[in-house]
Image: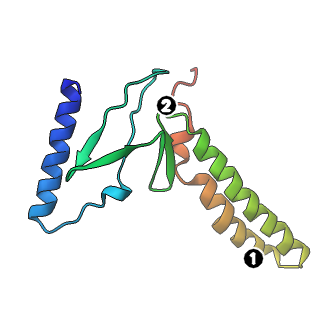
Amino acid sequence: MGINDNHLQRALDYTSQYCTDNCLLLNVNKTLSINFTLQKTLTIDTYEINHSEILYATNVRLLGVIFDEHLKFHSHVDHIIDKTKHALHGLIKLRKAGVRSHSLVLFYKARILSVLSYAAPLLVPTHLPK
């Protein structure tokens, strides 16, 4: 464990103690560790909360966005495609069933556009040429 890892473990210990002192519960089973890096190979350090090891993950879901360790968002985009594909299929079925245009637009906005636009700024490259 390097010096930064030692600081992280101490921060976890402090957070755990704070939660205990304030009658808050930490669910270690829902806690994951991930390293964000540009390196192809990395060292995986282990951390603990209340003497329980935190599991390491190569991707995590936070507020509906799937982050991978290289911040490429491929898993997130695949998830969005699958989710909107099912909604689009439903939209087509509704249209074939004769649902009015106004209702189809509402369905589109609620089930497709909302999914496509959620967290969209994360997916746009910031290094576009000027």
User: With 106 as the anchor, is 8 left or right in this view?
Assistant: left
Task: Determine which quarter of the picture holds residue 26.
Answer: bottom left
Residues 83 and 2: in front is 2
Q: Is residue 116 above or below residue 93?
A: above
Q: Which residue type carries mark 2?
A: His
Query: How far from the left and from the top, in percent, is residue 129?
Result: 58, 20
Quadrant where the C terminus is found in the figure: top right
Residue sitting at x 12%, y 57%: 18
Q: Residues within 10 Å of mark 2 (few under 14, many from 20)?
A: some
Q: Which residue type carries mark 1?
A: Ser
Residues 105 and 14: in front is 14
Secondary structure, mark 1, is helix
Q: Residues within 10 Å of mark 1 (few under 14, many from 20)?
A: few
Mark 1 highlights which residue?
103
Secondary structure, mark 2, is loop
Residue sitting at x 69%, y 50%: 81
Query: How far from the left and from the top, in percent, is residue 15?
Result: 17, 51
Q: Is residue 50 above or below residue 22?
A: above
Residue sitting at x 39%, y 39%: 34
Query: How far from the left and from the top, in percent, is residue 20?
Result: 13, 62
Mark 2 highlights which residue?
70
